[in-house]
Image (spheres, grey):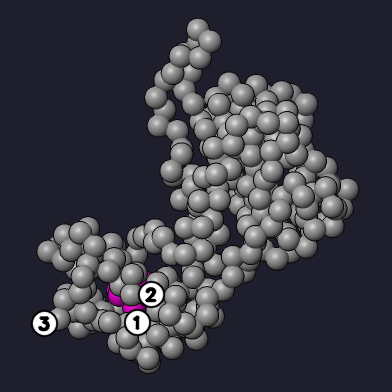
Amino acid sequence: MSTINLTPEAEEFLLKSDEERILYCKKDHWLGYGAAVKLIELLEDKFDDPPQMRHEGLLIYGDSNNGKTAILKKMYDLHKTNLEYIDKETEIVYEIPIIYFQAPTIPDEGRLYSLILNELMVPHKSTDKILEKVKLCEHYLNKLGTRMILIDEIHNALTGNLNKQRTFINDLKQLSNRLSLTIILAGTREAHSALSIGSETNTRFPSIELPRWNNDRKFRSFVATYERCLPLKIASNMADDPEIINALYYQSEGLIGKTVNLVKKAAVAAIKSKREKIVVDDIVYLPKL
């Protein structure tokens, strides 16, 4: 029986029941592949910026299901509050250095501030006037030491009325200016196009594309690394199997999210079949009916 070099956690799961191993295969596992590592390093650099008059943000854009959310959530996990209290100017408070949320589905100022207040756990009414929400946001973002705001799916808020879009983006810039914090956006190519219209917005949120994979050594390396996270009893050696790697690439369309979902489903199929290794017939996104 050929076993693979599993991660320590995956190796522990080899001794557990099939049901437990299946649940583990379905879990998300962070893998520091090249582009993701570079982006996290870039975000860390921005997170460590000292207070300044004009913080430069960032737009991470690319196709849907290509890893943008995973990168933002990894950054959030690295710095999220642990709810430990600290002394701050004779007052005991806890810090929330970073917040993450998905953009509202329309460019609505009120919803934007409600989302921020929700992440800061500040009681308020969604029907409160915008100015009241602004004051609450600024007070608590400052009090709780928030240094970075991560806003996912920003393309949702950059549709429809152009004036409302501009107002929405201006609100973000003003928050950043007044509180000396960094705002990171993530979205599709539509977000990139919308933010590229104004030169000032383009310089405030310089953009970086998260590209699709090519069917090359990097893709095979990612698949081989991910295989180490799967508690299967026999090595599948997917990266060395041209049939499997080509099927994975073809069905995933070079998108990391689809690649991971395909591998998860294949691992579950391998356990359920008692085969304990992935074969090319397991690389299916949905079953044939």
Give the quadrant of the N terminus. bottom left
Q: Amino acid at mark 1?
A: Ala
| Nearer-N-terminus badge (3/1) | 3
24 versus 144 height, above or below: below
Q: Residue furthest right?
A: 163
Residue 6 located left or right of residue 134? left
49 versus 128 height, above or below: below
Residue matched to label 2: 221
Give the quadrant of the C terminus. bottom left
Q: Is the residue marked by circle 3 packed among few (<14), some (14-19), or many (20+) residues within 10 Å? A: few
Q: What distance separates the C-alpha of mark 3 from that of mark 2?
A: 23 Å
Q: What distance separates the C-alpha of mark 3 from that of mark 1?
A: 19 Å
Residue 266 on the magenta span: yes
Residue 271 or residue 152, whichever sits in front? 152
The residue segment tinted magenta is 263-268
Which labelled disc corresponds to residue 1?
A: 3
Q: Are marks 2 and 1 in contact (CB under 8 Å)?
A: yes
